[in-house]
Amino acid sequence: AAGVIQSPRHLIKEKRETATLKCYPIPRHDTVYWYQQGPGQDPQFLISFYEKMQSDKGSIPDRFSAQQFSDYHSELNMSSLELGDSALYFCASSPDGTSENNEQFFGPGTRLTVL
Amino acid sequence: AQTVTQSQPEMSVQEAETVTLSCTYDTSESDYYLFWYKQPPSRQMILVIRQEAYKQQNATENRFSVNFQKAAKSFSLKISDSQLGDAAMYFCAYRSGVYNFNKFYFGSGTKLNVKP
């Protein structure tokens, strides 16, 4: 079965640089979530999109922005990177909101290292 | 806001034995979903088991079962016949049922060690 795809899997950037993380949800999933998991921490919700519109927003820095495109893939843009942005970034997708299935399917994550 | 608490940062179990991981949560909602996710060293988040709050019957998935106490807001995970492959970080997660596209709130995780 198709799973959530994230690219790149690993990314190394310097401070103050920009990074773009991509997420391709499972086919026919219209909702995408982004989570940030720092070292030794639990995943923290950043932002979500439903049908290409932002549906919820968590503790996402103003330096970060995200969007969902017409093919439902999503991109997380991170600017002016700081050392503290080093983390594992998960994307998750879920099917249509009318579905009984409330599970979120997680991608493998993108490990971002800021030097 | 909802909070999820896992009070056991780390636990150990002997292979083939049973272990229970604890999770409590705080919410004023009556409609919600609870999950246990496993995160092995690969860091992939893998769904272990799911419980709908409106269901009184505890969910089971093979060797994994939950003890869901709605009044006490408790959601523990029992792993029977523990295997070496069960060693991982386990996260308890809460999701509101009010809107189907609600975010997850995660607990801080419990690291499970399985001894051969």
Image (cartoon, coloured by chain):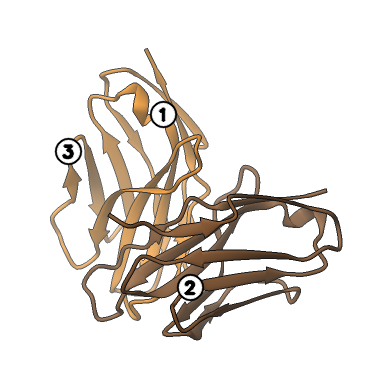
Chain colours: A brown, B orange
Disc 3 residue type? Asn
How far is mark 2 from mark 1, CA to CA? 33 Å
Disc 2 residue type? His
Q: Marks 2 and 3: in contact by CB < 8 Å?
A: no
Q: Which residue is mark 1?
A: B87
Q: Chain of mark 1?
A: B
Res. A73 mark? 2
Q: Residue A16 occupies which quadrant of the picture?
A: bottom right
Are the residues under marks 1 and 3 on the same chain?
A: yes
How far across and how far down the image is residue B86, in percent? 35, 30
Q: Marks 1 and 2: in contact by CB < 8 Å?
A: no
Left or right relative to B32: residue A62 = right
**SS under mark 2:** loop
Q: Residue at x 84, y 54 (%)?
A: A14
Disc 1 residue type? Ala
Are the residues under marks 3 and 2 on the same chain?
A: no
How far across and how far down the image is residue B54, in percent? 19, 68
Left or right relative to B57: residue A23 = right
Q: Marks 3 and 1: in contact by CB < 8 Å?
A: no
- Labels in figure, total: 3
Viewer-nearest of discs 2 and 1: 2
Q: Residue A75 occupies which quadrant of the picture?
A: bottom right
Res. B62 mark? 3
Q: Residues within 10 Å of mark 2 (few under 14, many from 20)?
A: many
Q: Which numbered disc flags the more N-terminal residue, 1 or 3? A: 3
